[in-house]
Amino acid sequence: MTILLEINDIHTYIEQYHILQGVSFQAKKGEVSVLLGRNGAGKTTTLRTIMGLNPASKGEIIFNGVDITKKPTYEIANMKIGYVPEDQAIFNGLTVEENLRVAMRKEDEAAMERQEYVLNLFPDLKKFWKKDGGYLSGGQKQMLAMARAFVNEAELLLIDEPSKGLAPIIVEKVMEALVEMKKETTIVLVEQNFYMASQIGDTYTLIDDGKTIQSGLMSELIHDNELQHRYLGIG
Amino acid sequence: MELLINLTINGLSTGMLIFLLASGLTLIFGLMHVLNFAHGGLFAWGAYAGVWFYSITSSFTVALIGAIIVGALLGFITERLIIRPVYGDVVPQILITLGFMLVISEMLKVVWGPNQIAATVPPALSGSWEIGDVLIIKYRLFIILMGFLVFGIFYYILKRTKIGLIVRAGVINNEMVQALGINIKRVFLLVFMTGAALAALGGALMAPYSGVIYAEMGMDFAILAFIVVVIGGMGSFPGSLFAAILVGLAGSYMAYYVPDLSLAVNMIIMVLVLIFRPQGLFAVKG
Amino acid sequence: MGKINLKSVYFWLIVLVFVLFPFVIDSRPMTILLTQIFIFAILAMSYDILLGYTGIVSFGHAMFFGFGAYATSVMLKNIDSSLTVFFLSIIVGMVIAGIVSFLIGLLTLRLQSHFFAMFTLAVSGLFLVLAEKWRSLTQGNDGFTFRAPEIFSDRINFYLFVLFCLVLVFLLLRLFVNSPFGKVLIAVKENETRTKALGYKTIYYKVVSSVVAGVAASLAGSLYVVSLRFVNTSMMAIDVTLNALLMTIIGGVGTLVGPIVGAAIIELAKHNLSILAKTYPIFERWIIFFGIIYILAVIFFPKGVVGTLKEKWEGRKMVRQQAMKQKEDAA
Amino acid sequence: MEPVIKTDNLTIRFGGQIAVDHVSCEIPEKHFKSIIGPNGAGKTTFFNLLSGELKPTEGEVYLKGERITHLSSIERARKGLGRSFQITNVFPNLTVLENVRLAIQSREKIYFQMLRYFTSYKHLIEEAEHILEQVLLIDKKDAIASQLTHGEKRKLEIAMLLALDSEILLLDEPTAGMSLEEVPIILDVIRNIKEKGEKTILLIEHKMDLILDLSDSIMVLFNGQLLADGTPEEIMRNELVESAYLGGMYNDDLAGNQ
């Protein structure tokens, strides 16, 4: 399988803090790569660095054979990379419809079909079509954020903790949607919920203290209790 | 009664001029969190450019368009040279835009001389209508119409168009807008130039209204615009219209009924707003 | 402790040099220029209390300068030109400045820093208009002349008095910024939320800082009009604020010596520009040059002369200390 | 005995989302309680409600029986509630010593002294040095805070909290982002404080193993709700906690798939 995204030894500073100190991994086309690690390990910063929101000071990020390390955020997004941030970043004050329209590059017939398809993944959103995004529940916000990243055709989705703070029944819905999205696109997922991560992840990368500890197949990690215990505090 | 109508028209037309200045200020602040202290300078440049274009072409339309172009160009220069180097750095930003304000105001004197310049109302708009006992000065009515027209156009753009949607989204979370593939810097520049052009248009409309223009007029009006932005709520477009009309009307009535208080009235409104609703009357959700 | 003593020896030596200066070099223009520098040094220092020590930007400094200026000139003209009235007028100016800065501070210092800058600009603009409109008292932009107290007719006496004020203000402000209170001000500038979390009511600190700055600026205004024996509304114009800003930034924010150095640099530059302007009229528009220098300074030279020198010096000290420590470790 | 902190149906909503959902708990004096829960469970928000950074939409906070719900964070700090921040929050351009000294100055209620040199308060400086010794930071006392490593900043943060001498310490992930070597040092510092037995301590921490032997009790937050509250042993045995915190409620399925 071809490698879609390749991250080589990236270092990122936020203000004077050296947050990423050497993160490397690869995401193969069509797979779900999960970034694991405890709080503050640098997973969110890794996604933000890929998006160019906290640019890397060292290392390289190759997407589809193009070096995107130094590119501005909007150009990275326009290379068909969708991003769902940890806090969802819904535009409060804009309706659900408007939240999606900000993301849509075109508004022709094909785009509308695409929108319809994405909305079928998240039927709840249709119910709140004209509602202010700020008044959605946590789960609805999460779905809106995912729909917004997916409303344009995406080659890669970066999704940061979609299950965070959600009730189990909603987590289930989010997972169903992710499984559906996975059929079409490559996903890099940050997830603390190990069950969810293990269910849909193909590969994992373990990050601790801003460094990659290990990468491998998810099926191997599921049986490696020692690793789980040491870095994820579970098992 | 006729007095009241005349005072109202006066107040409304001053209010509209302030609105043209304040709306740009508030849009730029809402989107970029930049408070442009040089905005009044752009207003003065618009006034001078308008008078100059009018003097060489004798066409008021050309004068207004010329002023808008000059304003947009100056806005371009301001954003690139002055705002960008200190983007996101509040204190330097405040300091530097005020410095730029003084530089461009002083440049007016270099280009057009240090003395006041007379400005005339174009013939088509001069004179007045008499309706019963009420005397309506045509030019003032024109300013009011222009003000509402500008408000209408911009309200439509903000609410109904894609670029307006992007600007509104950018006000809420400009990082996410970028992550959705939008070059926010270009949007900034566009908004900045638009705000500058609005200020310049305000200046060009102001010139025939007051009859004379002078380099310091920018600062005088900028102060009113700041008051309006505080009252209306930083970043709110309808808020700036409402507050501008409020300030214009209050000034106009007070100047007639209680002239000694006319100066203080804006102050009093602003202080009341700051005490009871410090985020402004039309606060933008952040 | 030895070091601090050495510092104060230098300080008093410099003061002594300036005290003796007019007696050694008998140059009237020079004395007047130095007097101006001292007055603006007081103004710039007062500004630095806000900008450099508390981290807030005020655009209303001209207003406080103006309060002092008008208090003194109106009282000297309308009561009499005795020394007592002069001192009284200084106090009146300070009290007005104190009250106004207190009210403004209480109203706006809770809000974002943009508000304070904008609000002070608006209020000082309104006071400027008031000064222009209240012609019976101020005679507007035309202004009026008045007699200074008799003793100041000798320029050297006035020079010495201003020098005394400068030294006094410097010492008081130095005490102020180095007091526990002043340390909290710096903490506010550094990280206001954290300061609050330590239990400090930061709003009061900011208000006091703005009152101190306003009062000191008013003193500068009182002295300035006596040096000119004339007052008009230009004393309240935004140019005065720009002047204070420029001096503080060029000299170095966050140090008290910086604004004094800045005042010297700017006043000397202005003096020379006005000579140049006689041959090249473009230099009459000196605001353009100062404005550009000021913008460039904010972007490229934010620490100013004194700040940059201090940084270099401290950097060297650090290197020396490290070298010493390494030697110790080796031994 | 009167609990030192009590919350009663403490609730906060942001828009449509309930971040802290009717949490009622009591913390006895000189008790060491840890708060655990998955990301986004509302732990930091709960702290913010205790320290006064946020005001609840519903419910009350009591400090030693006194209702403090309406008090600002400054007033609560003065009443003895001290907190550390998850994101390091020090005065970056002041020296380490000055950072601590400012905290002591606040505790000593030297608020408005403006006409004496700060150096004349010698005992403040001596005490600051003493505290820096406790957190093993004395070597760096003249360093500028921004030059410290991440771990050293966290130590400074704790030093400032100690300097305030608050009766109640709210520690929000004091080991977050620290290198593995630095974690034990911070834990030693916390253990020292605990062993002195003078303070009530609330600790948010992710690393379960680190808190088990330190805590007198542990409370578990999940989706803003208080899921369980008990001794470490009870919590470890609690199945509800295990499934919610560790496996997203689906551990059985997972086992089945294996």
Image (tube, helix red, strand yellow):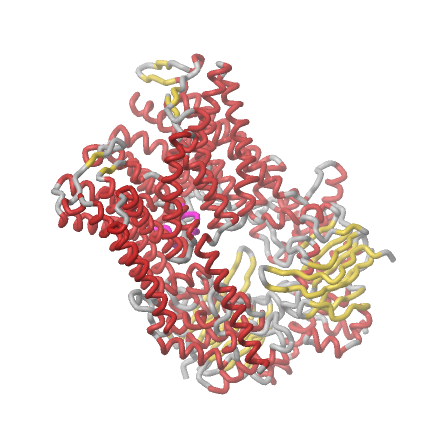
Residue D75 sits in which quadrant?
Answer: bottom left
Quarter of the image containing the N terminus of chain B? top left
Image coordinates for residue B239, horizontal then vertical, percent? 45, 39
Image coordinates for residue A182, horizontal then vertical, percent? 79, 56
Q: Residue at x 73, y 36 (%)?
A: A108
Residue B64 higher or lower than B180, as above or below: above
- Can the viewer see residue D191 in this picture? yes
Q: Which residues are magenta?
A: C107-117
Residue C113 higher or lower than A227, as above or below: above
Image coordinates for residue A220, horizontal then vertical, percent? 82, 72
Residue B159 higher or lower than A128, as above or below: above
A86 vs A203, left or right, is left
Residue A98 higher or lower than B149, as above or below: below
Q: How many marks?
A: 0
Residue B257 sits in which quadrant?
Answer: top left
Q: Residue at x 67, y 53 (%)?
A: A52
Image coordinates for residue B45, horizontal then vertical, percent? 46, 29
Q: Residue at x 31, y 42 (%)?
A: B268
Q: Residue at x 41, y 84 (%)?
A: D1
Report the front residue among C319 and D31: C319
Prevalent SS, magenta region:
helix
Q: Is residue C109 magenta?
A: yes
Report the front residue among B27 and A129: B27
- Can the viewer see residue A161 in this picture? no
Q: Is residue B4 magenta?
A: no
Report the front residue among C202 and D218: C202
